[in-house]
Amino acid sequence: MSDRVLMAPSVLSADFTRLREAVEVAEKAGADLIHVDVMDGHFVPNLTVGPPVIQALKRVTHVPLDVHLMIDDADSTVQWYLDAGADIVTVHVEACYHVHRVVQAIHAAGRAAGVALNPGTPLSAVEAILGDVDVVLVMSVDPGFGGQRFIPASAERIRAVRDMSNRQGHHVRIAVDGGIDVATAPLVVAAGARVLVAGSAVFGAQDPGAALSEIRAAATTSVV
Ligand code: DX5
Ligand code: ZN
């Protein structure tokens, strides 16, 4: 797998009445993925979008759709998101009953599988599944909302996941989500992150395309 840093703008912070334009602007600025945050009001204290919106986004998006499921019991509903056209499906280890089974379902559909970890979850929670997933998403805020402050300990957690993955000989791709901007991007990339999810720093900016390019430029100076 290439070591390139992938930019995954999160449309959570975009204008929901103009999602198509948000995707177009992000793609024009070189977005590698479009990150979609699915929240269920149980696992996280917020509700966002579900399969119909993913299906709609799929029709207007040319890069892979990176779907982040912040939902309880993803075991029961992961198929909805696969059917809606998600290209990468990331589930929380804290919210799956049988995480290997969920990952197998994602792979059976021919899609990429990710597992996400909340900032308070011990890294050992992904130890036994590292070899079976394409992505480990290290949350750098408690999930649920855009615009929260990056938790500094996250960089060390990224480094530890990278080391664990190297030790196991798997070289999983590490993603990071929460509080990523021009200041934090270099830190997480230096620690080993290769997918940067950024919401408010992109879509909260006056010029989202320029903001995306600036974060990428800041990030790529730190590739280790
Ligand atoms: C938060 C979501 C994020 C969110 C990030 O729970 O998973 O993807 O959009 O937003 P920022 O980049 O503003 O922290
Ligand atoms: Zn997310």
Image (cartoon, grey):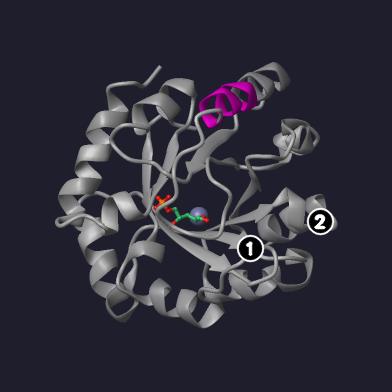
Q: Is residue 101 left or right of residue 149?
A: right
> Which SS type dominates the magenta stretch?
helix
The residue range painted magenta reads 154-161
Residue 140 in the figure: left or right of residue 9: right
Residue 183 lies, in percent from the top left, at: 31, 32
Magenta-drawn stretch contains 150: no
Magenta stretch contains residue 155:
yes
Q: Residues within 10 Å of mark 1 (few under 14, many from 20)?
A: some
**Residue type indicated by callout 1:** Val
Q: Residue at x 44, y 43 (%)?
A: 149
Q: Is residue 108 above or below residue 57?
A: above
Q: Is mark 1 within 8 Å of ligand 1?
A: yes
Residue 47, quarter of picture: bottom right
Q: Is 147 positioned to the left or the right of 174 in the image? A: left
Picture layout, residue 185 above or below residue 35: above
Which numbered marker is on residue 123?
none
User: Regarding mark 2 in the picture, which secondary structure is present there?
Assistant: helix
Amino acid at circle 2: Arg
In the image, 158 versus 63, the foreground residue is 158
Residue drawn at x 67%, y 59% as measured from the top left: 106
Instruction: Quickly name the residue at label 2.
Output: 101
Residue 24, x across and y down, in percent: 23, 65
Vertical side of 175 occupied by 148: above or below: below
In the rendered image, residue 26, in percent from the top left (x then y), is placed at: 25, 57
Would you say 135 lies left or right of 73 here? left
Badge 1 or badge 2: first in the primary sequence: 1
Judging by the rendered image, the residue that carries numbered circle 1 is: 44
Residue that lies at the very extreme toward the right in this rendered image: 97
Check contact, mark 1 vs mark 2: CB within 8 A: no
